[in-house]
Image: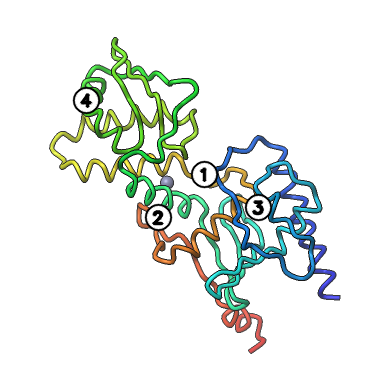
Amino acid sequence: SYRENKSDALKNISKKSNEQKSAPNKKTEYEIQQDTVISSGEEPVTENLSDNKTNDNKNEAYTELIIEQNAVDIKYIGEAFSTYIIAEKNGKEILFIDKHAAHERMIYEKLKAEKAGAFSQLLLQPVTVTLGKEEYDAAINNLNMFSECSFEVDDFGNSTVIVRSAPQYIDASEIPDCIAEMADYIAKGKNDIFTEKMEWFYHNVACRSAVKAGNKSTPQELIELVKKLEENPQIKYCPHGRPVCIVMKKSEIERQFGRV
Ligand SMILES: [Zn+2]
C-alpha cells in the first residue's frame, strides 16, 4: 500500500541519519521542548531527542514528528545535500530551509540583542591568538568591541591576545580565525562608525558559529531549527540577504503532476 511504501522510504531516511551520527557531531545547545508531539501512535520520543546517541527506533520516530504550535503543523521530512531541511507545513506546503542561513540569522539576532554578553561562555582552555602588529594594536585598542560581541579578550603581550570567554554558539576551533578576522577588520575600517562595525562583528561571528552547509546534522538539530524558525516568522533572510526558506505549494506540485 501507499502507506507501507511511505514507511519504507522513511526507514531509509532514518538509516541514513543514523549513519551520519557515527561521524563526530558538533555539540548543540538545543533541546526539543516538551510540547512536541508525535503523530500516528508512534512511541513518544521527546524525552531523548536531545541525546545524540539515539537508536534506529527513535530515528524512525523523528520522521513522523509533528510540531504543533500556533495552529501550525510542521512535519520534518529530511535533509537534502546536507544543506536543505525539507519539511511539510499544514499539509499544504513543502518548505526547503537553508540550514546555515537559518541558523546564522538566529545567532545573529541573539548576539545583537545580548550586547552585555549574556551568551558569553567561559572557555575551559583560554585561546591565545597571535596577530600582525597593526591588527594587534587595533584589537587591544578596541577590546570593548569584542566584549559587545560576547568575547572576553585581553592583551597577552608580544602581539598576542588571549580569549577567555566566547559566545556559546561558536566552536572553539573557530575562535582564532574569528578573532584574527575581527582584528583585521578593525585595523582596516578605521573610519567606519561603531554601530556599523558591530554589525559586521555580529555577522561574522554568527556565520562562523552556525552549522555549515554540507556538514552533518542530526534530525533533532534540524527539527529544532525548523521550530525556531516557525516561532520567528519575521526571519526571512540570512544576515547577508539570502532567503532562509523556499516554499513549494502542494497545489503547485499537484498541478505539475497533472492532478488538478
Ligand atoms: Zn554565513
Distance between mark 2 and mark 4 Cα atoms: 28 Å
3D distance between C-alphas at marks 1 and 2? 13 Å
The residue tagged 3 is: 219
Which amino acid does the dot numbered 2 rest on? Cys
For residue 175, what is the image quadrant?
top left
Residue at mark 3 to residue at mark 2: CA–CA distance: 21 Å
**Are the two marked residues, 1 and 2, in contact with CB atoms closer than 8 angstroms?**
no
> Quick one: SS at disc 2?
loop
Q: Return the residue found at the far top.
A: 158
Residue at 61% of width from left, 46% of height from top?
217
Q: As shown in the figure, which amino acid type bears the numbered disc 1? A: Lys
Q: Which numbered disc covers residue 238?
A: 2
The x and y percentages for residue 84 are 56, 56
Q: Earlier in the sequence, mark 1 or mark 3?
A: 1
Mark 4 highlights which residue? 138
Inter-mark Cα distance, 1 to 3: 15 Å
- At x 49% / y 28%, what residue is drawn? 173
Q: Is residue 165 above or below residue 79?
A: above
Q: What residue lies at 19% left-to-right and 25% top-to-bottom?
A: 141
Q: Earlier in the sequence, mark 3 or mark 2?
A: 3
Q: Quadrant of the C terminus?
A: bottom right
Question: Which residue is label 1 attached to?
Answer: 212
Q: Secondary structure at mark 3?
A: helix
Residue nearest the viewer, comparing 214 with 157: 157
